[in-house]
Image (cartoon, rainbow, N blue to C red):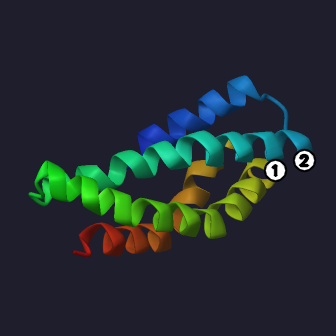
Amino acid sequence: PCHLGPVVGGWYKVLDRFIPGTTKVDALKKMMLDQGAFAPCFLGCFLPLVGALNGLSAKDNWAKLQRDYPDALITNYYLWPAVQLANFYLVPLHYRLAVVQCVAVIWNSYLSWKAHRL
């Protein structure tokens, strides 16, 4: 739906500054921070932004967010923790965004469907 490469790439650099290692424990910490902080905030911003861009009133947008956010976040947790754990453990920093963008083709299709469903 939108190009988030700079945001996600910047987030990965921040994660690597806070948690500089590459051990399994470091990868787990990065994944927990990514999924505990970035994912909920991203979805909480993305869904109402799309609603606003689609002309939903504030009231309708809020109702749609309340309806769609929990399911979108749960679905996120089925996919992204495993992807990110592997990404943070196995993939060098400068390739992580490319890995995520490949998986994001599928994820963004889901999010687009979710965001445009009335």
What amino acid is labelled 1 in the image? Tyr
On the image, the x and y values in percent for residue 13 come to 61, 31
Q: CA distance from mark 1 to mark 2?
A: 6 Å
Badge 2 amino acid = Lys
Q: Residue at x 17, y 59 (%)?
A: 60
Residue count near mark 1 (Cα–Cα under 10 Å), binned few <14, some 14–19, many ≥20: some
- Seen in the picture, residue 41 relative to 109 is either above or below; the reply is above
Is residue 41 rendered to the left or right of residue 51?
right
Q: Which mark is residue 56?
A: none
- Element under label 2? helix
Position of residue 22 measured from the top left corner of the image (x, y, whole percent): 85, 39
112 lies above or below 30: below
Residue at screen point 24% across, 71% down: 116
Q: Is residue 5 above or below residue 50?
A: above
Q: Which residue is mark 2?
A: 24
Q: Earlier in the sequence, mark 1 or mark 2?
A: 2
Image mark for residue 89: 1
Q: Is residue 56 left or right of residue 87?
A: left
Q: Secondary structure at mark 1?
A: helix
Numbered-mark total: 2
- The C terminus, quarter of image: bottom left
Closer to us: 46 or 23: 46
- Does the rendering let one see residue 1? no
- Neighbour class for label 2 at 10 Å: few (<14), some, many (≥20)? some
Asked if the residues shown at circle 1 and circle 2 are in contact, with their CB atoms under 8 angstroms apart, the answer is: yes
Seen at 63% across and 63% down, the residue is 77
User: x, y (%) of residue 79?
Assistant: 63, 68
Residue 87 at x, y percent in the picture: 72, 54
Quadrant showing the N terminus: bottom left
Q: Nearer the viewer, residue 61 or 36?
A: 61
Camera sees residue 8: yes
